[in-house]
Amino acid sequence: MRTAPSRFSPVKAAAGLAVAAGVGAVAYGSLIERNWFELREEQLAILPPGSAPFTILHISDIHMSPGQHKKTRWLRELASLQPDLVVNTGDNLSHPKAIAPLLDALSPLMEFPGVFVPGSNDYFAPSFKNPFSYFAGPSKLSTGRKHHPIPLDTDALHTGFGLGGWVNLSNRAQSIPLKGIRFDFSGVDDPHLNRERYAGWPRGAAGQDSAPHVKVAVVHAPYQRVLDHFTADAADLILAGHTHGGQVCIPGYGALVSNCDLPTWRARGLNDWESAGRTTPVNVSAGIGTSRTAPFRFACRPEAVVLTLTSKE
């Protein structure tokens, strides 16, 4: 007696494997990689000749929500690095009730000198968006009738940072002497919201014009117009975040989006930027968190960055 032919086909087998692989990738990205924090280390020879090494801890895109205990523990452990300076490039929040947990997590780091600028998620809580919309271009703040941005208590956040001794560089410039070097900082509010206004560089104080100094620009979203401005204005270093390193990357290829006009291959890491005949190193952090509406990373681990600055010699 002949048996009925099997309805199982190679096509159905491949489809089943694809579905299983997709489910596994989602589980890995949401349960494992988004909490698999790493420390990236870089070195730059930009200090005046004869200077001792200087370490900057660059943190960005924490996107804190209540109850994120793994992230809190890891942030608190970063203080063991004992950086000479902490630079926070924004998007600290992802929930209206996250300010107290964030300040608690960062309190050990606020024992060290620090500077900061805000990102859009320090002003408004994230709202749900179709994740595929990011492939159509940089995200925009939803303000239509169906979407009402939830304002965050930005003043309370900035006050907390200020009480910890960190300096707000939102559309401001300020000099800070650290380890015998005058650091000239210039920062802008978030270009992703078109809030940037350039303050130039701090003017030389009496008797300090000849002191060795380093110009550091700080920005949340690394739009090309901002990188062009600071590079043309002779910055020695630019620090930025916002991109999440692409957040979802293809192994061997990299980021698919940068959520701004930065080329995707620059969405994470230390690269040189050229403008007006000048070249400036730019460090773009892949960030520490994700929006709570898209809690997923793939082939793009969350990171903090330690930049060791050394003498030009």
Image (cartoon, helix red, strand yellow):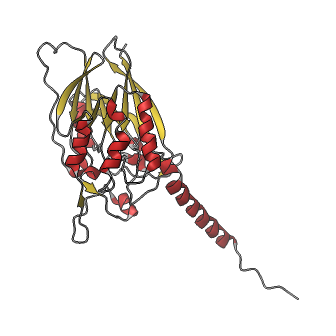
> Residue 286: which quarter of the image?
top left
Residue ID at (25%, 63%): 142
Residue ID at (67%, 69%): 13
Coordinates of residue 300 in the picture (x, y in percent): 48, 47
Residue ID at (56%, 63%): 23
Q: Nearer the viewer, residue 303 or 200?
A: 303
> Looking at the picture, does residue 57 appear above or below residue 243?
above
Coordinates of residue 176 in the picture (x, y in percent): 23, 24
Residue ID at (30%, 40%): 89
Q: Nearer the viewer, residue 271 or 111?
A: 111
**How many numbered circles does the render carry?**
0
Q: Residue furthest right?
A: 1
Quadrant containing the N terminus is bottom right
Q: Residue furthest left?
A: 206
Q: Nearer the viewer, residue 287 or 11?
A: 287
Query: Does residue 225 appear in this view?
Result: no
Q: Residue furthest bottom?
A: 1
Quadrant containing the C terminus is top left
> Looking at the picture, does residue 32 appear above or below residue 82?
below
Q: Nearer the viewer, residue 244 or 150?
A: 150
> Looking at the picture, does residue 220 appear above or below residue 67?
above
Q: Is residue 238 left or right of residue 253?
A: left
Query: Does residue 244 appear in this view?
Result: yes
Coordinates of residue 119 in the picture (x, y in percent): 27, 47
Coordinates of residue 236 in the picture (x, y in percent): 28, 26
